Amino acid sequence: MSTLIKNGRIITATDDYVADILIENEKISAIGKKLPEKVDSIIDAKGMLIFPGGIDPHVHLEMPFMGTFSSDTYETGTRAALYGGTTTVIDFILQKQGNSLRAAFDEWSGRATGNAVGDYSFHMAVTDFNDNTKGEIKEMVEEGITSFKTFMAYKGALMIDDRQMIGLMEEVKQQGGMVTVHATNGDVIDYLVQKHRSEGKLSPLYHYLSQPEVTEAEASERFVDMTNYTECPGYIVHLTCEGALNAVRNATRRNQKVFVETCIQYLVLDASLYEKDFDGAKWVMSPPLREKKDQATLWAGINQGLVQIVGTDHCPFKWEQKLMGKDDFSKIPNGHPAIEHRMELLFSEGVAKGKISLNKYVEVTSSNAAKIFGMFPKKGTIAVDSDADIVIFDPNTKHTISVDTHHMNTDYSAYEGWEVTGKVKTVLLRGKVAIDNNECLIDKGYGQFVKRKKVSQNI
Ligand code: URP
Ligand code: ZN
Ligand code: ZN
Ligand code: ZN
């Protein structure tokens, strides 16, 4: 099966030019002007932008969490991602405390294999670091799972202490991997949650007030200091605020390998949404949305190169699940649905409004994730021999986001009524047309597991 995409304006992290792209055997086989048209199909992309398929390195599909499961399956979640131009996601496996990493890997693989529509990989969340776990790190790296997630919060559930953190960093460094972190101070948050509850302050607003900026700044500083001491590459997920970014500034002054992801919601939404009584539950996530000034910090951080990736932390729940916390904010499942909207929202709010360049857009939605997480140049760029993961994007069409038209398995939209400029028109995944004009043309099971390289071979 061969396909020719003609006349598109190709944007990579570094380039911007008009050319044709020839696709054969799932890969890009040639790029040039006026390539021969002896192919099975031709797509005319005149007037369109051509991006490498988006990579969202922070999603939670079918994740057991806070007494329920996130509501998108591998099928619905990766399909919705494709509709929005994201061809590869990295999901989080959660080790059960007392159990092995292998058991968790098998459980997650069982859910994903044969069900994913788009390509996927895994991070391994280590929630119980002990001598047995230590022995499994090498094994996981050999399986292509080279990033190990830690939680400094969710006390009593996912959180590990600093003793475990240091031990994990030493082993991961040894095996050529990376430690990633949810960096907020779990003890301080736990104290504030209990304080608010005992005072009868139970609405979603108090979720926000229980996780002030200092909890994130302090934990981020502690994390980067520990990565400095152990010389382990580090990555902070869903960074939201100035205080936390300053911790990273210090790390870069020491020439540390510390990378930063923010998420689309922290760039475009703010904490005023928590003032809407229980409706605020739609945006109950950790860390919470911050202030407008933090949005400005994050946009600047992207342009300064301090923030390398914009993900989603897609962790969707249906309204019925959010209602588990109607009388107590601490029982509202944390997370919001966004996997489908990241690429279009970032284009609309970032590129179309002149905040970031087209090249920067490709960097933060695709190329940097591929590089940092060991998938480059298979994924993350448009080049000969790369996977033909391609987004054909109409930069001028406007449309409105709504629960009535989205494809995520949730019965509300966290972005209801948002008008966006720019629309995903066609998406190819490994050479196959996956999405065309609002229709999905591939089935579950097409999505493949992406085995990742050691971080030490990549960055
Ligand atoms: O609220 C969130 N972020 N839910 C998902 C789990 C996590 O902390 O990333
Ligand atoms: Zn988190
Ligand atoms: Zn998350
Ligand atoms: Zn859309």
Image (cartoon, grey):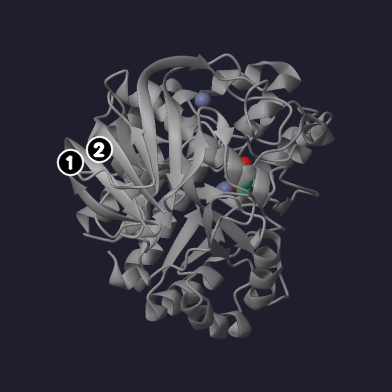
The residue lying toward the viewer, choosing from 258 and 92, is: 92
Q: Secondary structure at mark 2?
A: strand
| Image disc number at residue 249 | none
The residue lying toward the viewer, choosing from 204 and 75, is: 75
The correct choice, above or below, for 435 with respect to 249 in the image is above
Q: Quadrant of residue 332?
A: top right
Q: Position of residue 314 (x, y in %)?
A: 58, 41
Crowd class of label 1 (few under 14; some 14 to 19; many from 20; radius 10 Å): few
Q: Secondary structure at mark 1?
A: loop
Please tell me which residue is depicted at 63% across the width and 74% down the height of the picture.
Answer: 101
Crowd class of label 2 (few under 14; some 14 to 19; many from 20; radius 10 Å): many
Please tell me which residue is depicted at 20% across the width and 44% down the height of the picture.
Answer: 35
| Image disc number at residue 15 | 1
Q: Position of residue 244 (x, y in %)?
A: 40, 43
Please tell me which residue is depicted at 37% across the width and 34% down the height of the picture.
Answer: 392
The correct choice, above or below, for 56 with respect to 26 in the image is above
Does the beta carbon at disc 1 come under 8 Å from ligand 4? no
The residue lying toward the viewer, choosing from 443 and 379, is: 443
Q: Quadrant of residue 355?
A: top left
Label 1 – label 2 distance at C-alpha: 6 Å
Q: Position of residue 313 (x, y in %)?
A: 55, 43
Q: Quadrant of residue 280?
A: top right
Q: Is residue 92 visible?
A: yes
**Residue behind mark 2:** 11
The residue lying toward the viewer, choosing from 290 and 41, is: 41
Q: Are marks 1 and 2 in contact (CB under 8 Å)?
A: yes
For the N terminus, the image quarter is: bottom left
The correct choice, above or below, for 252 with respect to 208 in the image is below
Q: Amino acid at mark 2?
A: Ile
Q: Position of residue 198 (x, y in %)?
A: 80, 35
